[in-house]
Image (spheres, rainbow, N blue to C red):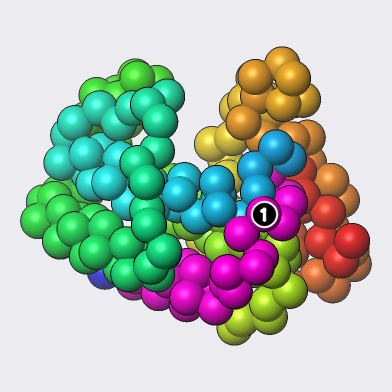
Amino acid sequence: MAEQLSHLSQVLDLAESVLGNVRPEQAGLPTPCRSWDVRTLAAHMVNGTHQFTSAATGGRPDFGAPAPDIGDDWAGAFRSGASGLRSAWQSAGDLDEEIELSIGRVRKSFVLTQQVAEFAVHSWDLAAATGQRPRFPDGAYEAALSWARTEMRPEFRGDEAEGKAFGHEIPAPPGAPAQDRLAAFFGRRPGS
């Protein structure tokens, strides 16, 4: 549990840092998340902290609901949500315990590592869209990639027009770092 919580904390810190370094004039830039611009991705990331807090406490997240307005202090909004998410996981108890989500019954550890993957990928997306080169935490990215390779269902992949959340895997360049391999696995094109 300590390692998974450490990975979550690392990607939450990374996401906050990347959000804090977005310049106002970059809000309308496109992102690797196909139809999302930087502002929409930032709102999704902030909303994710609240939705994932619900999942961590046994609730049912609703990602279909519109993301709330996050104002101009994206890093502050994210920090506030991330604080609640960290607290929820620190109080979550046994990670082998199962909880019910819209995808069925899963262990809490599944949910926690899925959240690591989500914030890891979107931090990469936001950094790529805004030309940032942060220090990516290798261990957290390796854990996210390991989880994704085991748990990513083929039915989640495809074109956005088909309502799919993730693109098809793209081969990562030889010797690519963990963050680029994870991005490629989720259908992003590192280095383009």
* 99 on left or right of 104: left
> In terms of depth relative to the viewer, which is nearer, 103 or 163?
163
Quadrant hosting residue 103: top left
* Magenta segment main secondary structure: helix
Residue 30 against residue 101 in the figure, above or below = below
Q: Is residue 141 visible?
A: no
- Compared to residue 7, the image places residue 162 above or below, namely above
Is 44 inside the magenta-drawn segment? no
Q: Is residue 164 left or right of residue 175?
A: left
Please state which of residues 109 and 64 is positioned toward the viewer in this rendering: 64
**Quadrant location, the N terminus:** bottom left
Residue 160 visible in image:
yes
Asked if residue 27 lies in the magenta stretch, the reply is yes
Identity of the amino acid at label 1? Answer: Gly
- The residue sitting at 55% across, 46% down in the picture is 40
Query: What residue is disc 1 on?
Result: 28
Q: Where residue 160 sits in the image (x, y, percent)?
A: 72, 26
Name the residue located 45 percent from the left edge and 49 percent from the top edge: 43
Looking at the rendering, the stretch of residues picked out in magenta corresponds to: 6-33
Between residues 38 and 100, which one lies in front from this camera angle?
Answer: 38
